[in-house]
Image (cartoon, rainbow, N blue to C red):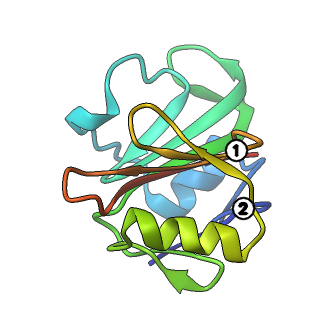
Amino acid sequence: MYEVLLEKGLSEIQFGFRPSQVKSILGTELFYEEWMGGNLENFLYYQGLLIGFKGDIENCPTENSFVCMFQVKAIHPVSIWGQEISQATKQEIESLLIAKNIEYATLSNGSIESADNKLQFSFNIANTLDEVYFAS
């Protein structure tokens, strides 16, 4: 299960990690999926997971770059604040944000985004969680 740790990172991968540290945990083989789109120079990508980097980027993150964001597909078990949310509905995510006193807005595409733009939840046609995005 991936655990979203808003101020720290995703499970054992922390904001600020270098590419080699991420690869030591998740492996060196990258796995592209169509939902990831193009231009992935700033990312390491694994099944259902994009890890974004800032800093020195050439054709891919270098050791002078560091983790700054995550995008996780809900094909993986995902939790936030100790609550599993992989199958959460839009209403359940809104209730969770309200309980945590996090201001948010619903975007024109139906996604929910925190007021500080560091946390976003996207939903599928069935109105259940599709992706979680968060940044440092």
Residue under the point 33% across and 33% down: 36
Residue under the point 43% across and 24% down: 40
Quarter where residue 57 is shown? top right
Q: How crowded is mark 2: few (under 14 residues within 10 Å), some or many (20 or more)?
A: some
Closer to the camera, 58 or 69? Answer: 69
The numbered mark, 2 or 1, whose residue comes first in the sequence reads: 2
How many discs mark residues in the rendered view? Answer: 2
Residue under the point 78% across and 47% down: 16
Q: State the mark number for residue 6.
A: 2
Is residue 88 positioned above or below 25 on the image?
Answer: below
Residue 135: in sight, yes or no? yes
Residue 68 percent across, percent down from the top left: 70, 40
Left or right, 126 with respect to 100, comes to left
Closer to the camera, 54 or 81? Answer: 81
Closer to the camera, 59 or 73? Answer: 73
Which residue is identified by label 1? 118
**Callout 1, which amino acid?**
Lys
Is residue 84 positioned above or below 92 on the image?
Answer: below
Q: State the mark number for residue 64.
A: none
Location of the N terminus by quadrant is: bottom left
Residue 5 percent across, percent down from the top left: 69, 68
Residue 65 percent across, percent down from the top left: 72, 31
CA distance separating discs 2 and 1:
9 Å
Residue 12: in sight, yes or no? no
Is residue 79 positioned above or below 32 on the image?
Answer: below
Location of the C terminus by quadrant is: top right
Residue 34 percent across, percent down from the top left: 21, 33
**Callout 2, which amino acid?**
Leu
